[in-house]
Image: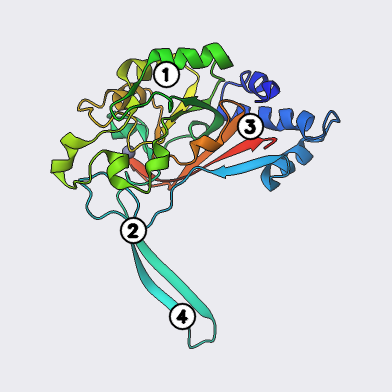
């Protein structure tokens, strides 16, 4: 962890301010004590010279995990593939997918009437300092993240920086290649729903996150921010009514530090969408 990043990031009110803070902090860090110009520091971020970009996205393919009632999954149809009569190679596909499958955005309107849609979310809700709350050492298939988990995190690492993307690491990402283990059941269709078992965020912890006033978005490495056995989706409701979006089926959270990284989560801009496929990445300074 780099305390400089945390301190600077915590001064900004939004994700945009966090990026400014990232550039400012890197101008100190990347030069190893020598001042760098903001342009040099920004270049070093985007080139990866002063840190590592980590892809937090599962691929979309035949094996992508969708909610059990979505039997179609991800479909990719070939429209063209091969040499053309004009002498050049050409390929193109058509894809179809539900909004809520694989690594994806939950726009707030998913569980809150009148809240922001996928295209309405400001970039400041999608970009910001990452805090990774790791409950993987005690998360069981029906586990619900508690206020204690969150307070233990802030006791150890300090307050959640303004504009943060709070990522919950349950360890379930390691199960992605085993659908039955990831969801808790190999069943599909409506019969699977009572048999879903995976961790999520408890109702009180979700309300605690919303009450902080400094959380831009919440992500998790399971199929849902609510645990598999939830029937009231209390975490969805508690967060989305405050226009705090969710990122679900997030990958590779084991590669992020508890603090100091930054998240860029860019969903497909579906007009009026309740969610969208998401490409989410993180920047880890100094990695
Ligand atoms: Zn969703």
Task: Tell me residue 253's x, y (percent).
Answer: 49, 36
To which residue does mark 2 refer?
A: 62
User: Which callout, 2 or 3, points to the residue nearer the camera?
Assistant: 2
> For the view shown, which residue lies furthest in the right direction?
34
Within 10 Å of disc 1 (Cα), the crowding (few <14, some 14-19, many 20+) is many
Task: Tell me residue 276's x, y (percent).
Answer: 37, 45
Q: Are marks 1 and 4 in contact (CB under 8 Å)?
A: no
In the depicted structure, whether residue 63 falls above or below residue 234: below
> For the view shown, which residue lies furthest in the left direction?
191
Establish whether ligand 1 lies closer than 8 Å to the Cβ of label 1: no
Q: Are marks 3 and 1 in contact (CB under 8 Å)?
A: no
In the depicted structure, whether residue 257 falls above or below residue 252: above
To which residue does mark 4 refer?
A: 82
The one nearer the camera, 136 or 123, is: 136
Regarding mark 2 in the picture, which secondary structure is present there? loop
> Which quadrant of the view contains residue 107?
top left
Per the rendering, the mark at residue 209 is 1
In the rendered structure, which disc, 3 or 1, sits on the residue that comes first in sequence? 3
């Amino acid at each position: 962890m780099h305390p400089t990043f945390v301190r600077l990031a915590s001064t900004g009110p939004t994700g945009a301010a966090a990026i400014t803070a990232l550039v400012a902090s890197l101008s100190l860090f990347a030069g190893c004590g020598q001042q760098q110009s903001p342009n040099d520091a920004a270049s070093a971020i985007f080139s990866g010279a002063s840190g590592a970009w980590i892809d937090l996205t599962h691929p979309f393919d035949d094996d992508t995990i969708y909610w059990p009632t979505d039997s179609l999954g991800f479909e990719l149809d070939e429209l063209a593939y091969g040499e053309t009569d004009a002498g050049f190679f050409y390929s193109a596909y058509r894809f179809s997918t539900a909004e809520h499958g694989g690594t994806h955005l939950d726009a707030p309107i998913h569980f809150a009437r009148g809240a922001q849609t996928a295209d309405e979310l400001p970039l400041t809700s999608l970009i910001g300092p990452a805090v990774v709350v790791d409950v993987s050492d005690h998360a069981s298939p029906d586990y619900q993240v508690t206020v204690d988990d969150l307070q233990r995190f802030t006791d150890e690492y300090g307050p959640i920086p303004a504009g943060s993307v709070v990522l919950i690491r349950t360890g379930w990402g390691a199960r992605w290649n085993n659908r039955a283990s990831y969801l808790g059941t190999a069943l599909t269709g409506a019969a699977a729903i009572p048999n879903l078992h995976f961790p999520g965020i408890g109702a009180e912890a979700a309300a605690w996150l919303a009450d902080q006033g400094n959380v831009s978005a919440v992500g998790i490495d399971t199929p849902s921010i609510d645990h598999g056995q939830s029937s009231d989706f209390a975490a969805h409701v508690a967060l989305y009514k405050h226009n705090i979006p969710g990122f679900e089926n997030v990958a590779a959270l084991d590669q992020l530090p508890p603090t100091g990284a930054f998240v860029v989560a860019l969903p497909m801009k579906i007009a009026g969408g309740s969610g969208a496929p998401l490409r989410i990445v993180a920047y880890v300074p100094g990695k």
